[in-house]
Amino acid sequence: MGMKKMCKTEIIAHDSSGMKAHLLALLLVAAAWTAPLHAQAPAAAAPALEGSTIDGKPFRLASLKGKVVLVMFWSTGCAVCRDKMPELRQNYQGWAGKPFEMVLVSTDRDMKDVDAYEKIISRTVPVKQRFVQLWAGDAGYKDNLGKPAQLPASFVIDKTGKVVERYQGRIPAEAWDKIAELL
């Protein structure tokens, strides 16, 4: 009646092709879960970030439109954050004269920690390697970037003011390549 008799090898071959499809689907789901944070987040509208710099000057991120901006949330208690500072300073100095700015937002609970760190920096780091710094605990501080899940958390903002990349943890080497492309 039109029924075909299958031998064991046909059954195994049939089952393995179904298993391959299921395995492929499972691998695709796993890849989506493990994709980098910046690949998951589409470009967002212009972020808002404003407050007073740690030396008391008013600051608005919108004033940097036309420049590529790296915003990094950090803390003096974050070893990875402190470890990245020399690299940040070198890149900042290397792109002097280019449409690039770096803005750091300290998430320290107490401004005393930021002040103590700044006293050390003011004696050891050349002025041309210093960038804009804000303290998130300041009464006038506001942003719409959201509270970072971990530190450091970094955002690359293009010249039009849109977030184009997001990074959690260490800033990968390709982030600097992306910034260079945007310049």
Image (tube, rainbow, N blue to C red):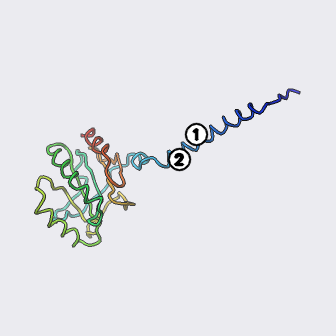
User: In the rendered view, does 82 fall on the left or right side of 6?
Assistant: left
**Residue 30 - label:** 2
Residue at the image position 36 percent from the left and 50 percent from the top: 166
Q: Quadrant of residue 151?
A: bottom left
Q: Quadrant of residue 127?
A: bottom left
Residue 34: percent from left, percent from top: 47, 48
Q: State if disc 1 and disc 2 touch (CB < 8 Å).
A: no
* Mark 1 residue type: Leu
Q: Gap between marks 2 and 1, in whole Å?
A: 10 Å
Residue 70: percent from left, percent from top: 27, 50
Q: Is residue 3 above or below residue 43?
A: above
Q: Is residue 45 above or below residue 50?
A: above
Q: Is residue 168 above or below residue 135?
A: above
Mark 2 is surrounded, within 10 Å at the Cα level, by few (under 14), some (14 to 19) or many (20 or more) other residues, namely few
Residue at the image position 32 percent from the left and 50 percent from the top: 46
Q: Quadrant of residue 86?
A: bottom left
Quadrant of the frame with the C terminus: top left
**Residue 24 - label:** 1
